[in-house]
Image: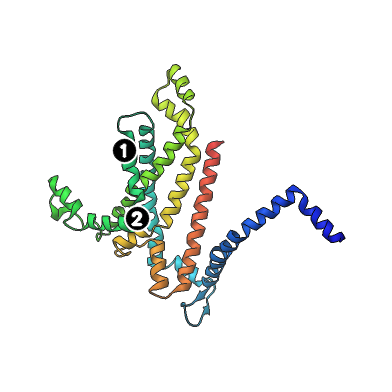
Amino acid sequence: MTTKNGLQHFFSERRHQQALVIMVFSLVPVTLLVLFTYLPFAKMVEFSFFKMKYIGPRTFVGLDNYAQVFSRTDTVKALLNCFYYMGAGVIQLSLSLFFACLLSFKLKGSSFFKATLFIPYLVCSLAVGFIFKFFYSRGLVLDTVLQGLGINLESLPYWLKDRAVNNYSIAATSIWRYMGQSMVLYIGAIQSISPEFFEASSIDGATQWQQFRYIMLPHLKPIVALTILLMIKGSFSAFEGPYVITYGMNGTATPVVLMHQLAHEANKVGLASAMAVVLLALILLVSWIQKIIEKRMGD
């Protein structure tokens, strides 16, 4: 009876009831998170130390798989291809910020242009890949437009085969696709700024550039940090575009495309797992450097 009364008293307190409710409602999602995220990740790290296939014997090789990630030509090239997408991401974020500032004011047709720029983000990733595969194909949309401008077809490169331009071509698709998403985030942040700031600055004679620099930009700093982080993550994890458009051929494979080919076609599961761990480490490293830069700029 004493124990029973003690439990009743324990659960009669509000803070204990709240803790119990939180634990009960968190049990299922936390269990699913552990089963389908943390445990597979732990197994992937384990696989990265073995030379193995999905089925068959395993041979412990230590850090040999990690050494291959930085010594094989295809893996190094795939990691370097991420910088094409980072460059495109910088352009995309700059254009998003420009259009967000432009369309935040009451302009005729601004709603139409907002919807037009945001629609590409709603298109299925695979559909985007097929659209641009057709767009870049020899003699089709892009070549036809350039020929209409007076450029000879023979002087144009093969946009998806020429190694000098194919990665630029594929990375440019991300500008079209994700510009609307970033623009909407920026517009939401700009519209949350009190109009009193702009009214007071106008009375003081501030130009639109000064309003952007001293009013908009400080308020946009958290959103800018978020979009940069998403851009970095997206640059390292680009998959649908290069996979659908070129299947990673002619030097266009990104780390995720190459991991798919190594694991599912070449049956080099250990090497693919090691590459995934390296990719995660690079994303965390770049994110950490970004945080340091933001902190110093803020100070």
Relative to the observer, which residue lies in front, 65 or 23?
23
Query: As drawn, is 5 to the left or to the right of 20?
Result: right
Question: How far across and down, in percent of the image, does residue 226 sit?
Answer: 48, 45
Q: Is 230 located above or below residue 162 in the figure?
A: above
Say what amino acid the circle numbered 2 marks: Cys
Query: Label 2 to label 1, Cα distance in Å?
Result: 20 Å
Question: How far across and down, in percent of the image, does residue 205 sit?
Answer: 42, 18
Q: Which corner quadrant holds the C terminus?
A: top right
Q: Which residue, given by chain and number where applicable, does mark 2 sit on?
A: 124
Task: Give the quadrant of residue 209.
Answer: top left
> Do the residues bearing badges 2 and 1 touch, measured as CB atoms within 8 Å?
no
Question: How far across and down, in percent of the image, does residue 31 sit?
Answer: 60, 63
Which residue lies at the image location 43% right of the left edge and 26% below the top edge?
211
Q: Residues within 10 Å of mark 1 (few under 14, many from 20)?
A: few
Q: Which residue, given by chain and number where applicable, does mark 1 sit on?
A: 113
Query: As drawn, is 36 to the left or to the right of 160?
Result: right
Q: Does any portion of residue 223 appear in the rendered image?
A: yes
Task: State the count of labels.
Answer: 2
Q: Secondary structure at mark 1?
A: helix
Q: Earlier in the sequence, mark 2 or mark 1?
A: 1
